[in-house]
Each structure stands twice: as structure tokens, then as C-alpha cells.
Amino acid sequence: MDAHKGRAPRESASGENAAPRVIRRRPRNRRAQIAATSAEAFGALGYHGVSMEEIASRLDISSTALYRHYPSKYALFREEALRLSTLCAEAVQLPDDLADASASLRLQHILDTLIEKSIANRRGAALLRWQSRYLEEEDYRVLIDQLIEAYRVVGGLLAEARPGPAGADSVVLATAALSIIGSISDHHVSIPVRSLTKLLRTACLDVVRSDLPPVGEPPVSDGATEVPLRFKHELLLRRAIELFHERGYPNVSVEDIANAAELPASSAVYRFYRSKGDILAAAFRRAADRVSAAIGPAIAASDGDPERALTRLIELYVAGSFAERELTFVYYAEISNVPQEDRTVLRNIQRLNVEEWAKLVVGVRRELSAAESRVLVHAAFALVVDLGQWLGPDNPICSRARVTHLMQVILFGRPAATTR
């Protein structure tokens, strides 16, 4: 008889049966797990808001184990940011079997590939959209060059597929299409992958096939009106947002804000706001309230016509965003730095605003579900930020009229048929 057969379980010193020893083996894909988890953390909380200990905790490993894979938080951040930008550059490389295909077919293939990659990396792609500016200069240049290549290829194929639009128009339409694809990293709307793929593809094609309004005269910015010095709290708020936009929230001190607002000392800031985070929250509440305040009057003046109401809301949204371009960007890029309690309130306001817009979209396009409509609303909002960031806030090729037109195309599938 085998000596081990029938052996009683080993007892501990206390007389109780000892639990079998659990051997934890390191997963073969540990590095990939670290990359995915860190990208999600950086995208949600910001580069400066995440520590190696936070990432290790999410992975249920020790920080010492994490440092065995990456020597620093920056090394981890850099690798994942450049991995995502490399995916974009690779997605616009055509396979050999499409070399002789029509420009339209090649463009559709690239858009489909970008959509597939974006969905697969949705939970971490916010890192690429909003946190990449915290890369060191050399790394940032590599990332931007890769993204520019993606924009160049899409714009070139669009111009080839549609000889009509001028070169500048192709740039705007390509930027709009890529903005639609990237916007899914800005929200958590739950929708099946197949439905999301079809929705993004349709929206991109609607945009690239649309005819932009004429460029016209260069727009006159109405966001540069000077705040009277006696309104110190307003001046302080504006100067703070300008600095957050230029340098990034973590790189701006209260002293910097005081100097920009021409206050005698940094302590003077605290007469108006409790903290730097409170300044950011106050600006964000104002932006959220501006969007909320427009909904009721627009619906009331529409005589029950959802397209008319939404057309008016788009006009108001574009006007408000153009008046506060820095704030529109900072809202997306820095919301993770708002104190948690304020962030929860802001997220709730944003969610309610999106739901009201989505109800109007469904009223116009009854074939869409509520979730699909919310995805399109988020895409329309993101478009305003992305056009300003990539093409310049005062560039006449992305004027108010053109941004308004593109928001309509995203939400209606065509330009608006009604006017207010």
C-alpha cells in the first residue's frame, strides 16, 4: 500500500487542520495587465493623481513587485501613452491587398480599424486624449508625430475620395471623424460592441461625406472681453483657467494665480476661494450650469419640435464654448483634479444634461436607442474641444458655423432641417 494513502490531514499546533498552502504564480501576461490597469488609472485620475501604490493596489500586488517591471511611474506612463499613439499610427497603414482599392474603400477600412482599436482600448484611451501633455518633451514629440500621421493619412484619403472639398475642408472633416472615434473614452455609456461599432462608423461616414459651409470671414472672438479689476473674483477665476489650460492644473500654484490676477499676495486668493481645487470646481459648475440653463428655454420655444429645440441648443452650446475655449478644454482634461464631492455633483449635472439632449435626439431619430443617442451627444460635445485643440481656437476653417454644422451632422445624421 502507498504510504501516503489514507494519511490524515496535517494538524496545526492548535490541533486544527492546517489549510493547504496556496501557491500564487505570476500571470504570464502580468506586464499587459499592468499596462491596461495603469492606463485606466491615468485616464480616470490624471497622471499626477495616480501613484505606483495606487496601481499596485488595483492589481493586488505589492508596489515592490510593480517596480520590478517598471522603474518609475513615468516609465509606466510613457510606455502606455506611446503604445496607444503607436496603435493609431499602425491603424492607418493599409494592408497590401487594399493597395489598388478605391480611396473610399481604403478610407472606410482605416476608419473601421481605428474604431476597432479605440473600442478595444476604450478604458485607457483617455490617457492619450487628456494626459499626454505631461510627457517629457522628446516623448511628447514622438506621440504627436504619430497622431499627426494618422490625421494626415485620413485627410489625404478623404481628399482623394471626395475631390470636391478644399484641402482645408478635408483636414476639418478628418479631424471631426477622428474626434468621434476618440470621444468614447470620455464617457461610460454601456452599449454592445457591435452596436457601438456601427454607430461610430455611420457617424464618421456622415461627417466625411458632408459639405461644410463656406469659410467666410475670420471669426471675431467674443471671449476676450476684459474683466473690470473691481471684480477680482471673476478676474481670478479667468486667469486661473488660462493658467490651467496653458500649463496643466498640477503645474500651477496659488502664487501663480495670485500674480496673474494682480493680487498682492497668494494669501489674497483665499479671500475668494478656499483652495486651488475650489477655483477649478467653481469654474466647472459655471460651465455645467450654462449648459443646463439653456435646455428649458430651448425646449419651451420649440413648440414641441425636438429638432428645432436641439438646433437651438447646439447654437447656444457652440456660442458658449467659443466664448470660453480654455474652460471647455480644461473641463475635460482636469476634472479628475476637482475635489471628490464637487466632482460627483458635476458628473451628475453632466449626466442629466446629456440625457436631456439625448431625448431630443431620439425624438428626431427614432431608430436610435437612448444609449446610442447619448454616445452621439458625447461625440458632438467632444468635437468642439478637439477642433479647437488640433486646428487652433481662432482658425477660420473651424468657425462657429462649421462647428455648428458638424454637431448637427453627428446628432441628426445630416444638417438641421429647421431653424429657430
Image: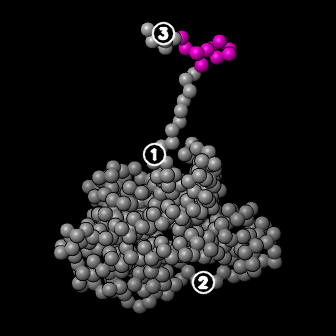
Task: Identify the element where label 2 is drawn.
Answer: loop
Q: Are marks 1 and 3 in contact (CB under 8 Å)?
A: no
Residue ID for mark 2 = 225
Find residue 102 and report its horizontal and vertical position in percent. 18, 75
Among the 4 quarters of the image, the one containing residue 283: bottom right
Find residue 342 and report its horizontal and vertical position in percent. 62, 55
- Tag 2 or tag 3, which sits nearer the N-term? 3
Task: Assign the magenta stretch its main secondary structure.
Answer: loop
- Residue 229 seen in render: yes
**What is the spatial separation of the Cα atoms under label 1 and label 2, in whole angstroms?**
58 Å
23 above or below 417? above
Among the 4 quarters of the image, the one containing residue 285: bottom right
Question: Which of the pair 218/94 is nearer the observer?
Answer: 94
Find residue 100 and report its horizontal and vertical position in percent. 18, 75
Residue range corresponding to the magenta coloring: 8-18
- Residue 375 seen in render: no
Report if residue 3 lies within the magenta region.
no
Three-letter code for the amino acid on which mark 1 is drawn: Arg
Residue ID for mark 1 = 28
Question: Which of the pair 272/231 is nearer the observer?
Answer: 272
Residue ID for mark 3 = 6
Three-letter code for the amino acid on which mark 3 is drawn: Gly
- Tag 3 or tag 1, which sits nearer the N-term? 3
